[in-house]
Image (tube, helix red, strand yellow):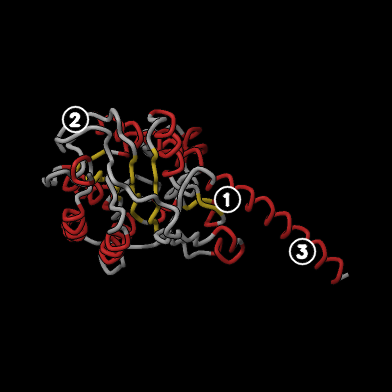
Amino acid sequence: MNDLFLIHALSHLLALHAFFTAACRDAYKHVDCTTHCLIPDISAHFFPELSYKYLNNNHVAARKSNMASTTDTNSPTNQGIKSLRILCFGDSLTAGYSGYGYFHYPYAAQLRKRLKEDLPDTEATVDVAGLSGDRVIAGQYVRRIKGSCEKAEDAPYDWIIVLGGTNDLGSEERPDNIYEGLSRGMTLLEPQGANVLALSVLEGEHTSGDIFQRRKELNNLIAYHEEDRLYYIDICAAVPWFSMSPKMRETIWDDGLHLTMDGYKKMGDAIATKLLELLRTAKQPLNSGSKQA
């Protein structure tokens, strides 16, 4: 009887392994994950073939020029962009944590898909640096930003998309302290010559009351942060919790904090739309054009 039970249990585990392996492979087929993509959870135990995908030196071709014919780095155009290097940096919401960690679908996958569709002549590389559970305060956030930039010295990023503060709010940290940590991280990015797109902190099932007010204050601080080549998107407007219908929540939200695959796709679409607009109107990254000639 015990042997029969064990056989049934093993068959169920094997079926789950096959299902989640397929889901993870589908999630990752559109995204380039590098050594920055560190997702230390149970998916790494069950699916080692999908965790910690390392980047070798041949993965990214050396860039001699990021623009076809641009001598003014402030030119507001995305015409003729030969290559575009983007880093998506943050915590589990950047890593695409879903299904209680059984699989990940980073919003970067949808972002890369949209860039390929809208900029077919551009070689777009989208790297993911999402660390589940990381915090701006008493975490590895700022140190990881510095490390990501140092690793990309030979092929610097044009745009860095940052998201942080969710876990800090859950740990009852003050918005001004979280903002100070985020500011330190963004200051470290300035010498890299990349443009920065800062995301607002998402809502969620447990962000009512005190957390709601602190999240609102933190997002206001991020939105009005003044720094050259820093831009902002209110991602809550694209992926809300409170204003979303219960039926839509079942499709977009996973556990009240993280998103489903559809949710991350929606998030990636909103970021792609904003980024494509900025590629036309914003100052070009200092790494572009004649800077790399």
Distance from disc 2 to disc 3, alpha carbons, whole Å, reads: 58 Å
The CA distance from mark 2 to mark 1 is 38 Å
Relative depth, front residue between 73 and 246: 73
Residue 231 placed where, x, y %?
A: 20, 41
Location of the C terminus by quadrant is: top left
SS of the residue at dot 2?
loop
- Dot 2 or dot 3: first in sequence order is 3
Q: Residue furthest bottom?
A: 2
Q: Residue furthest right?
A: 1
Please state, as top left, top right, bottom left or bottom right, where the N terminus lies in the image.
Answer: bottom right
Question: What element does badge 1 sit on?
Answer: helix
Q: Which residue is mark 1?
A: 24
The residue type indicated by label 2 comes to Pro
Q: Is residue 46 above or below residue 217?
A: below
Left or right side of 189 for 126: right
Relative to 184, residue 82 above or below: above
What residue is disc 3 on? 10
Which mark's residue is nearer the viewer, 2 or 1? 2
Residue 222: % across, % down: 19, 47
Q: Which numbered disc, 2 or 3, marks the residue closer to the eye? A: 2
Circle 3: residue type: Leu
Front disc: 3 or 1? 1
Q: Which residue is mark 2?
A: 76
Instruction: Say which amino acid is labelled 1.
Output: Cys
**Mark 2 or mark 1: which comes first in sequence?**
1
Q: Is residue 186 shown above or below 137?
A: above
Q: Secondary structure at mark 3?
A: helix
First reached walking from the N terminus: tag 3 or tag 1: 3
C-beta proximity under 8 Å, tags 2 and 3: no
Q: Residue 91's x, y, as percent? A: 37, 56
Instruction: Assess disc 2: are there few (<14), some (14-19) or many (≥20) residues with their C-alpha within 10 Å of its C-alpha.
Output: some
